[in-house]
Structures are given as structure tokens and as C-alpha cells.
Amino acid sequence: MSYTVLLQLQADFVGENSIQHEHVENAAKKVLESENAPDGVMLTIVLCTDTYMREMNFKYRGINAPTDVLAFPAPPMPPEMAEETGGYLGDLVISLEYVAQRATEEQRSLQDDVSLMVVHGTLHLLGYDHHTPDAQKTMWAAQRRILESLGIHLEVPDYIHDDDEESR
């Protein structure tokens, strides 16, 4: 299968040079592959600062605070375009500052936590959510399976977001 992951750096962040872009792209592609996404599917990942994330979170969710990842599913394409291209899945916005702070607190690598956010966000783009305990159990199992296939072994708490910060 062939997937396209567009990676965009929104702003300077002191830790951005420690992020291996191919690992970010591979994490998204592994989700698409493991979830049997159609050939040719595309998505965009924006790595940004807390300032930009705060603006996005406020604009789209009414929450005046940064968060780790936001997922913006694309509207469905006309069937003939989706067949030809595989479709555009949507956009992920990930705050490197936010993720770096949590990685430090949890004594994990920034690269692993960014990969976690890519996997988590891409699963959201594919329709997973964690609004109920059962849905979360299903999403966390898929997340764990994909991370382990990438060689990343992280313990993710049952609830990584407060109710007012829940990523979509």
C-alpha cells in the first residue's frame, strides 16, 4: 500500500531538531496500513508550538488552552475522486511543546511521545474515539498494538485527558 503523509513545521521549537521526520511519517503510515486504509490515502501532520495550538483549540473547540493533538477529519470526497486518489483523511495538529513537557514529566523520549500522538490522532481521523469506556478500550488496544509494531512500548493511562481537554 502507498500512503502520503505531508509533514509541516508550523513554527520554531527548540526540540524540533530531535524529531526524526521519517519516524513521524512511518507512525501515521503504520496506522493506515494496520487499519486497512485504502491505497493512496493522504493526511497532513502539523508540528506546532503551544501558542499556535492554543489558538487552534480556542477557534475550533472554544478551549483557551493548548493540548497535545487535535484531529480534523476531512469532509468526504466525491466517490470518483476518492477512488482515484484514495482520499484525503484530514489533518493532525501536534504541539511539540506540550508533548515535550509531558515526555519529560513521564521520563519518556520526545520521539516516542510524538509517535504516540501521531498514532492517537490518526486513529481519530479513522473514526476511533475515547468518549466512553468501551470506545476507549477499543482505541487504546489499537493504539498499543500499533505502537508495539513500531517498537514503542509506552504505558498510556486509561485517561490521558481531562474532560475539558479531550482531543477529537
Image (tube, grey):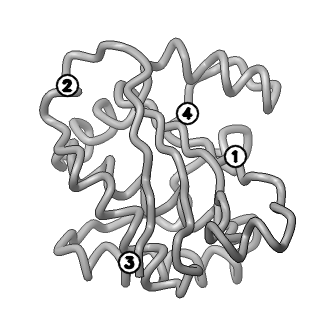
- 10 Å crowding of disc 1: few (<14), some (14-19), many (20+): some
Contact, mark 2 vs mark 1 (Cβ under 8 Å): no
Q: Quick check: 101 above or below 68? A: above
- Helix, strand or loop at label 3? It is helix
Residue under the image location 53 percent in, 87 percent down: 36
Between marks 2 and 3 in the image, the one whose residue lies nearer the viewer = 2
Mark 2 or mark 3, which has the lower sequence index? 2
Q: Amino acid at mark 2?
A: Gly
Q: Which mark is residue 15?
A: 2
Assign the N terminus to one quadrant of the image. bottom left
- The structure residue drawn at horizontal position 78% and vertical position 21%, both measured from the top left corner, is 59
Disc 1 residue type (three-letter): Phe
Mark 4–mark 1 Cα distance, whole angstroms, equals: 14 Å
Q: Residue at x 56, y 67 (%)?
A: 41
For marks 2 and 1, the one nearer the N-term is: 2
Mark 4: which secondary structure? Answer: loop
Residues at marks 2 and 3, CA–CA distance in whole angstroms: 25 Å
Residue type, mark 4 in image: Thr
Choose the circle earlier in sequence order: 4 or 3: 4
Distance between the Cα atoms at labels 4 and 2? 17 Å
Residue 144, numbered label: 3
Residue 8 at what x, y percent from top left? 41, 32
Closer to viewer: mark 4 or mark 2: 2
Q: Nearer the viewer, residue 78 or 101?
A: 78
Badge 1 vs badge 3, beta-carbon distance below 8 Å? no
The residue lying toward the viewer, choosing from 12 and 41, is 41
Q: Nearer the viewer, mark 1 or mark 3?
A: 1
Return the residue at label 1. Answer: 72
Q: Seen in the image, is 133 located left or right of residue 142?
A: right
Q: Is residue 94 above or below residue 63?
A: below
